Image (cartoon, rainbow, N blue to C red):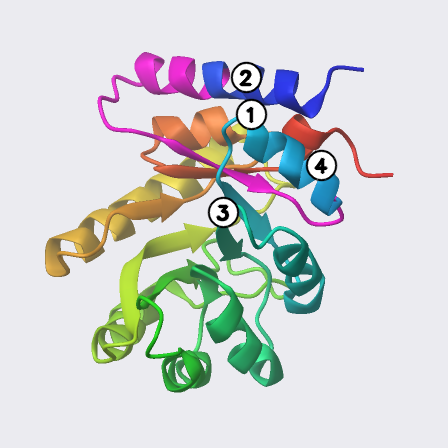
């Protein structure tokens, strides 16, 4: 089986090709989704040049962050953030991609240490209105963005979405396109906005064609989870 380092190089080439095929001249970044992966696996990818890692759970991430503290890594929380974990998230992470309600915004701003740079945040949008999925409705983006921008300890960077994987390619294209439009509106209103996080192992090339600037890849990088 190919090593994670080999998979990383292959994946970076695919991202570059997808961006070129879409006529993109800007950079598309890779977030390695490292949930369930060991600190040793993350360390090996870091040695191969990967810096940004995404975790779903605050507690699981904390153990890895402690083990890898000497490395210059960038940690993203991409899973649903429970209110009782906001303090730890604000202290541990560089980015929180799953901001979707006012209470979480207030808690993150309150607990972000003054000794650290402002916490980068993305508004998670439930673009397909799935009842079982986290994220705000598209019409709530403007209100949440204004709340985030009000806090000095937070930095609004953009939007995140996970379109329904059960839908066909055409429907996903529609979801990606609606996110692209929402991102363009937000970027025109806030100078700090530069990140549209969407696209995973099965659909990241399609997401790149619709303006994704950050793709979140787990399976294609680490292999199927056991």
Residue identifier under label 2: 9
N-terminal of the pair, mark 3 or mark 2, is 2
- Spot occupied by residue 164 in the image (x, y as percentages of width and height): 58, 47
Quadrant where the image shows the N terminus: top right
N-terminal of the pair, mark 4 or mark 3, is 4
Q: Is residue 157 visible?
A: yes
Q: Which residues are magenta?
A: 14-37
Classify mark 1: helix, strand or loop.
loop
Please tell me the numbered disc located at residue 73: 3
Q: Is residue 201 visible?
A: no
- Spot occupied by residue 127 in the image (x, y as percentages of width and height): 45, 54
Q: Nearer the viewer, mark 3 or mark 2?
A: 3
* CA separation in Å, label 4 and label 3: 13 Å
Q: Identify which residue is drawn at 58% across, 60% down.
A: 130
Q: Nearer the viewer, mark 1 or mark 2?
A: 1
Q: Are marks 4 and 2 in contact (CB under 8 Å)?
A: no
Residue identifier under label 1: 48
Count of marks overlaid on the render: 4
Q: Are marks 3 and 1 in contact (CB under 8 Å)?
A: no
- Spot occupied by residue 77 in the image (x, y as percentages of width and height): 54, 59
* CA separation in Å, label 3 and label 1: 12 Å
Residue identifier under label 4: 41
């Amino acid at each position: 089986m190919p090593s994670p380092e080999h998979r990383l190089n292959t994946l970076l080439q695919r991202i570059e090709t997808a961006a070129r095929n879409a006529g993109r001249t800007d950079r598309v970044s890779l977030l390695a989704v490292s949930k369930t992966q060991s600190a040793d696996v993350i360390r090996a990818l870091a040695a191969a040049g990967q810096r940004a890692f995404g975790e779903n759970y605050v507690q699981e991430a904390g153990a890895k962050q402690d083990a890898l503290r000497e490395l210059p890594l960038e940690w993203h929380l991409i899973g649903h953030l429970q209110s009782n974990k906001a303090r730890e998230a604000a202290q541990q992470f560089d980015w929180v991609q799953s901001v979707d309600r006012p209470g979480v915004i207030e808690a993150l701003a309150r607990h972000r240490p003054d000794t650290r740079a402002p916490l980068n945040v993305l508004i998670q949008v439930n673009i397909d209105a799935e009842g079982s999925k986290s994220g705000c409705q598209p019409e709530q983006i403007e209100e949440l963005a204004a709340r985030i921008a009000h806090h000095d300890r937070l930095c609004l960077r953009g939007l995140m979405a996970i379109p329904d994987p059960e839908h066909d390619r055409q429907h996903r294209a529609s979801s990606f396109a609606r996110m692209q439009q929402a991102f363009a509106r937000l970027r025109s209103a806030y100078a700090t906005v530069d990140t549209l996080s969407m696209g995973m192992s099965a659909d990241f090339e399609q997401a790149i064609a619709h303006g994704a600037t950050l793709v979140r890849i787990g399976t294609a990088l680490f292999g199927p989870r056991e």
